[in-house]
Amino acid sequence: MAAHNAIAPAYEAVIVGAGFGGMGAAIELKRQGIENLAIVERTDGLGGTWHVNHYPGLAVDIASVTYSYSFEPNPYWSRLFAPGAELKRYAEHVADKYDLRRHMSFGEQIARAEWDGANSMWRVFSDDGTERTARFLLTATGFLSQPHTPEIPGIHTFAGRTIHTTDWEDGHDFTGERVAVIGTGATAVQLIPEIARQAADLIVYQRTPIWVVPKLDFVIPRPVQAMFARVPLTQRATRLVSNALLELLMVTGVLHYKQFTFGNKAAAALAAAHLRRQIPDAGLRKKLTPDYDFGCKRPTFSNEYFTTFTRANVHLQDTSIVKVDPDGIITADGAKVPIDTLVLATGFDLWDANFPAFEIRGREGRDLGKWWRAERFQAYEGITVPKFPNFFTLNSPYSYSGLSYFTTIEGQMHHMARLLREVKRRKAVTFEVAEEANTRFLEDVTRRLESSVFYNGDCSTSRSYYFNHAGEATLLRPRSTAGALREMKNFPLSDYHFDGPTPWSGAIANPAVGR
């Protein structure tokens, strides 16, 4: 226990990241009476991926009634799958309603954080030298936050315009241009049809095909929006139906593949039928058909992606790229395609740049990133880690429920609430998950994942970000959504060690918030 004359931290909590995860954490902290907090964001605005991404065609690929906080429904979504600009506005609304802006600091990159055991607090350092001290540290840096640029020889020598989807040039007109898109993931599925409408010639370089199912999207009529606003129960019912369908399609058949193989095969059959309806050419269909099981790699929804490849100005290239020249792209068959603009829809650097997104050192100097890579990726209930007191890692191994990121966020909010209430009841200064509890949880999720498509299906060619460098699928939590939420609300408090009482001689300082 720290001495009674220890230095008090400046903040009760520092949250790194102002996306939906960080804002959800801040809302829960404020519910627990913690108002003295700082939210530090590396970009110039709030909203996370919905602030960074604004490429043409951007939209949610999970129904908006599900992809939103259940406690803060938006009755005014324009479509079932809302465009990205509406998610950005929703984020702004949440920040305003829950009084979060005054806690936020933008344009600041956190470089490292270390646990100060003598004073029972975290020291958090920014790239610019700013230091903050806090009782609690929460990382909400997102799963998909660090752009990935492929290591293709010559890519930096290209003399034309290069645009990454996370750094989009608003208003760029592709009319008359020869355009190349590298990547065919969920982002590319939304973007490619938009570019095809303008470009004189579009060539899409595909490394791995993606499973695509029909998108049952439609405009939500104004009378329905008004009904959602007047009678919130109707929107909650719609959310339940959406959740049930997603659970069946995206969770049961993937995480419980062994027990529900038929569900996985049915989803694959739906996607294959969708492809057959839209692509009459058998050769092109074969190129676009994945040779791995449904769910090994994140699938997506679209009604336009496949038909785009039937346009005269669009070409699919599945021969690997060997080099980028200043004026074009060369593939392994020796062919060179001259281009004017190169679009990188190459996704995010998930495992190298995240987990964690900056250096974090806990008790006894344990380096979280090195420990995860040496001893397996792990986090108790997907949120806390042994030897890291007063630390919540929101983008962590085994945290993602698989239904919606908002389900994950709200589950973690439940965990935080239960744990912080116990800290307050005990008048403790620190909490830390027990090694044995963490090990028990890791063994349980490892066992459960043995039934998933990742280990029972064929994922060998998927090149999926679900798998880390060790070949383990440590991102998704292998539980039903209801089961995951139930565990987050009811975990045994005996799984934690609590230390106290408060060591500081005075109250925690309350500095001016923001910049």
Image (spheres, rainbow, N blue to C red):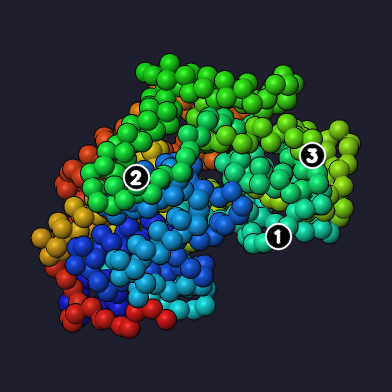
Estimate how packed mark 3 is, as few (under 14), some (14 to 19) or many (20 or more) residues with alpha carbons within 10 Å: some
Q: Earlier in the sequence, mark 3 or mark 1?
A: 1
Q: Which residue is mark 2?
A: 224
Q: Residue at x 45, y 79 (%)?
A: 130
Q: Earlier in the sequence, mark 3 or mark 2?
A: 2
Q: Which residue is mark 3?
A: 313
- Towards the viewer: 302 or 456: 302
Marks 1/2: CA–CA distance: 35 Å
Residue 384 lies, in percent from the top left, at 32, 51
Whether residue 9 can be seen here: yes
Q: Where, by quadrant of the figure, is residue 423 drawn? A: bottom left
- Towards the viewer: 132 or 487: 487
Kind of residue sitting beneath label 3: Asn
Q: Is residue 206 found left or right of 132 in the rendered image?
A: right
Marks 3/2: CA–CA distance: 39 Å
Whether residue 355 can be seen here: no
Estimate how packed mark 2 is, as few (under 14), some (14 to 19) or many (20 or more) residues with alpha carbons within 10 Å: some
Quadrant containing the C terminus is bottom left
Local secondary structure at mark 2: helix
Q: Residue at x 86, y 43 (%)?
A: 337
Total of numbered circles in the picture? 3
Q: Where, by quadrant of the figure, is residue 497 drawn? A: bottom left
Residue 272 lies, in percent from the top left, at 58, 21
Find residue 433 and name its label: none
